[in-house]
Image (cartoon, grey):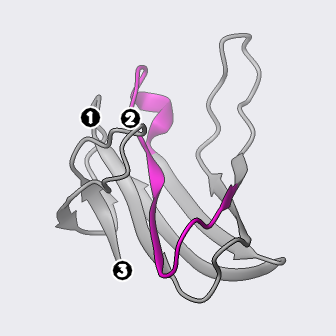
Amino acid sequence: MSYGKYSKWDRESHDLPELIDLTEKVKAEIGVEFGMIVEIFKAKGRYLDFRIDHPPFKDRNGNIEPSFEGSYQIRNNPYSFFLGDTIWEPVEDKRGQWTMTVFMDGVELASKTIILI
């Protein structure tokens, strides 16, 4: 449905963030929310899998952080959800390509690359 820079997202809320700028390039600043909103039809009760591939940055232990992956059960039909992230310290290692991909039953449904500059 949309992608780019969004308003601050409350992960505990059912409300999705609001689109601020429809763009593939987002300025890397602390607290900036970026990603995509996807709407799925005729899939209530099924599971979506997602992956966020990001530039190589290290975790607290100094290890390269792997891609972010997870699954989410679709609660209603149609179902809209936000897949993205926010920028945190240090900003320098977050710059680059962030690719967000959504799968169902191993089939890619949507993918978008946002470049943090």
**Residue at image x 52%, y 55%?**
98
Residue type at tag 1: Glu
- Which residue corresponds to mark 3? 1
The x and y percentages for residue 2 are 33, 75
Tell me the element at label 2: loop
- Which residue corresponds to mark 1? 29
Residue 117 appears in the rendering:
no
The x and y percentages for residue 14 are 37, 51
Direction from residue 24 to residue 44 in the image, left or right? right
Disc marking residue 96: none
Front-most of 33 and 29? 33
Q: Along the polypeptide, which appears first: circle 3 or circle 2? A: 3
The x and y percentages for residue 112 are 50, 72
Residue type at tag 3: Met
**Residue at image x 61%, y 31%?**
57
Relative to 33, say whether 111 is above or below. below
Badge nearest the viewer, 3 or 2: 3
Q: Along the polypeptide, which appears first: circle 1 or circle 2? A: 1
**Residue at image x 51%, y 56%?**
97
Give yes or no for residue 93 being in the magenta stretch. Answer: yes
Q: CA distance from mark 1 to mark 2?
A: 6 Å
Residue type at tag 2: Ile
Q: Along the polypeptide, which appears first: circle 1 or circle 3? A: 3
Q: Residues within 10 Å of mark 3 (few under 14, many from 20)?
A: few
Relative to 111, say whether 58 is above or below. above
Direction from residue 117 to residue 56 in the image, left or right? right
Q: CA distance from mark 1 to mark 3?
A: 24 Å
Which residue is situated farthest in the left direction here? Answer: 20
Tell me the element at label 3: loop
Q: Which residues are magenta?
A: 72-95
Disc marking residue 87: 2
